[in-house]
Image: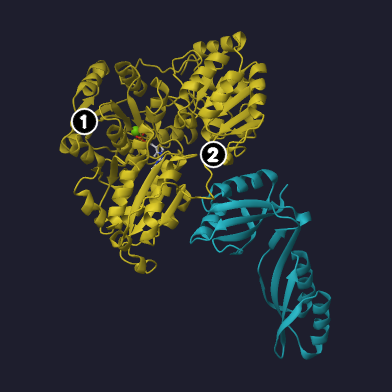
Amino acid sequence: MSKLTGAEIFIESLKREQVEVIFGYPGGKNIPIYNLLYDNPFKHILVRHEQAAAHAADGYARSTGKVGVCLATSGPGATNLVTGLATAYMDSVPVVAFTGQVDTKSIGTDAFQEADIRGITMPVTKHNYLVTDIKDLARTIKEAFYIARTGRPGPVLVDMPVDVLGARMEFDYPEKVDLPGYEPDLTTNGGKLERLAEEINSAEKPLIFAGGGVITSGAAEVLRELARKARIPVITSLMGLGAYPIDDELSLGMPGMHGSRYANYALCEADLLIGVGVRFDDRVTGRLDAFAPKAKIVHIDIDPAEINKNVDTFISLVGDAKEVLSKLLPLVEEIERKEWLAQVAEWKRKYPLAYKDESRDIKPQAVVQELNRLTGGKAIIVTEVGQHQMWAAQYYNYSYPRNFITSGGLGTMGFGLPASIGAQVGREGELVIDISGDGSFQMNVQELATISEYNLPVKIVIINNGTLGMVRQWQELLHQKRYSSTILKNPDFVKLADAYGIKGIRIENKDELAVKLNEALEYDGPVLVDAVVAWEENVWPMVPPGAGNHEMIGGEQDDK
Amino acid sequence: MTSKRILSVTVANKPGVLSRITGLFSRRNYNINSLNVGETENPEYSRMTIVVDADDRTLEQIKSQLDKLVEVIQITELDRTNIVDRDLALIRVNSSRSQRSEIIQIVDTFRARIVDLSTDTIMIEATGTPSKIEALIEILKDFGIIDIVRTGLVALNRGVVE
Ligand SMILES: Cc1ncc(C[n+]2csc(CCOP(=O)(O)OP(=O)(O)O)c2C)c(N)n1
Ligand SMILES: [Mg+2]
């Protein structure tokens, strides 16, 4: 067998993992890999900042279900990945990040561009490696992909010293992984499914709470069957949007801090809450002792460490959501639940998500609603973080898994633009819209260059309120309108787009909103829309930080 | 109610494992009372004996979070009533010539050993349960303790192994 260099082993290993694309950035310590990428063994997208490489790999993974791959050099290249890895970690996204490292002999000497990226990323990766011997390289790559995608997915980092990339070794890609300490699926539910079915069959006001885990495990379909058969209303976390069609009569959308009133009311009244692939995050639970006060809580999750972490559960089932729900399906009875569903329908009718639209300004919610109308709810929506993210969650009708890409757990501004690159590369030919904020947009604005270079037809819609709106909203409500550092002096976004060779459209008048948004969506190629909106609009309803879900403010029928 | 709980954790004997584990404890705000690590009968694995201050719920969390670490092979909570647990201490105390015999008597009573002597100090090696070591230290305080170093608890289940 002929010997391959470490860099060649890297390429061959990624081929075995069926990698289609790498998002990366070169430097002195990964240059041997770039030397091989010159011959295009697979697609490489040159981003303009390593953080964007991680977010793009993440967006690719979220939108396709495949493992996203990013590549950076040592030191600053590697540390630039950290926010992206932490973002993927919090939302359980399978990403494998590769970094170059100084040569093994120099490790620990503060060599030029040395950073202990394994140490730095330990708390924000599912697992990570420093490969100090070429004989471990292929096996490590195999393990990295396996760990990233199995069980509760997450990012894995592989740090590769440059001398390892240069060393030679026979290439032998292992068929199987041998990881005695890693058990991705610990399903042990003896008798619990039957108990759960009994609880469901005898509950009067059951409620399903579906999270990102439903999407990850591909359980959306069986969830729909289950909910419809047993007539159980469904709420979805931010990460779960798309797990259940939002316009279904049983759907109650998103609960929590900026959830709908009806979803929060249902949470407060339910007698059985069935959490599937959720982690009972504080943005959903509000004050814990006031969370789902009347409900027995059931928790189905692949990660045993999530059970009883934030809320005490009555029944817990560890396992893959799809598997558990499929087994549960035949055990639940068809029950009408007339009263409960009537109650839920009444709340939906009485407290719809709504906003006032009589001012001259364009309302941010209207932009999202219009996008929803124009795309029939079928686009892939990517967001940044802030008010626009919440409006994107509230006013777009998600009906398909993997069509809503947002940084939920970490809440990373700057995520959206690069993530939309990943989504557009992963879902070529589909409509990708990045609903952005004027603040967040500027956190990875350099990626306009990437979008332009690869002519990725992403539609960027900046909800331009001239502020760091979400923080401003808190200042308005909790700090007497002392708008400290939240009013932005923004560049001319249309000119900026132009400078990058991207079509720019500004929308300032209400009556041109539909036409111009349509023009943007119809345009063949990337577009940036600068939608100038009412600056002091707030996201309603809102459960104030530290309050219980029943204490939400705003969003009543006659909203102020 | 928190109490001291003992976890015996088998981990892969690889670089970085210790910092992965201590990192997990600090990141998740769990309290470590003591942590001891050493090789096992199999050189591929090390065993850590971790004493934590935790209530039942936190202990469950600690166990399942530890279990997620790829390099953690097995976690057993040791039942305090059915274990052999040992702590080793080296204690250097002041000892004038006239105090020597009194100290030796104490050392004998505790079945500890004298391992070093100088004109005015004595070093004692004591092995036993943590409470025995603490009792010894308490008594030796009267003479003036100069240094103490302890291994922290190591423990194994009694009887048959699964
Ligand atoms: C990297 C990062 N820094 C700071 C924050 C805190 N933060 C949350 S929302 C927000 C404002 C975002 O402004 P913009 O993107 O314009 O969105 P808007 O709320 O105005 O819609 C800020 C600063 C964050 N989430 N992420
Ligand atoms: Mg803004």
Nearest the viewer among B42 and A532 is B42
Mark 2 and mark 1 lie on one chain; the one further toward the N terminus is: 2
Measured Cα–Cα span from mark 2 to mark 1 = 42 Å
Nearest the viewer among A536 and A253 is A253
Disc 1: which residue: A526
User: Residue A297 shows which numbered tag?
Assistant: none
Q: Which chain is cyan?
A: B
Q: Nearer the viewer, mark 2 or mark 1?
A: 2
- Disc 2 marks a residue whose amino acid type is Asp
Chain letter behind tag 2: A
Q: Quadrant of ligand 1?
A: top left
* Residue shown at the point (26%, 19%) measured from the top left: A513
Colour used to depict chain A in the structure image:
yellow
Nearest the viewer among A527 and A170 is A170
Q: Position of residue A487 (x, y in %)?
A: 34, 37
Measured along the vertical axis of the image, is residue A456 above or below residue B75?
A: above
Q: Position of residue A378 (x, y in %)?
A: 34, 20
**Secondary structure of the residue carrying numbered label 2:** loop
Quadrant in the picture for the N terminus of chain A: bottom left
- Disc 1 marks a residue whose amino acid type is Pro
Disc 2: which residue: A185
Q: Which residue is the extreme one toward the front?
A: A1
Specify whether A273 is left or right of A87.
right
Q: Neighbour class for label 1 at 10 Å: few (<14), some, many (≥20)?
A: many
* Residue shown at the point (41%, 46%) measured from the top left: A175
For the residues beneath circles 2 and 1, the answer to whether they share a chain is yes
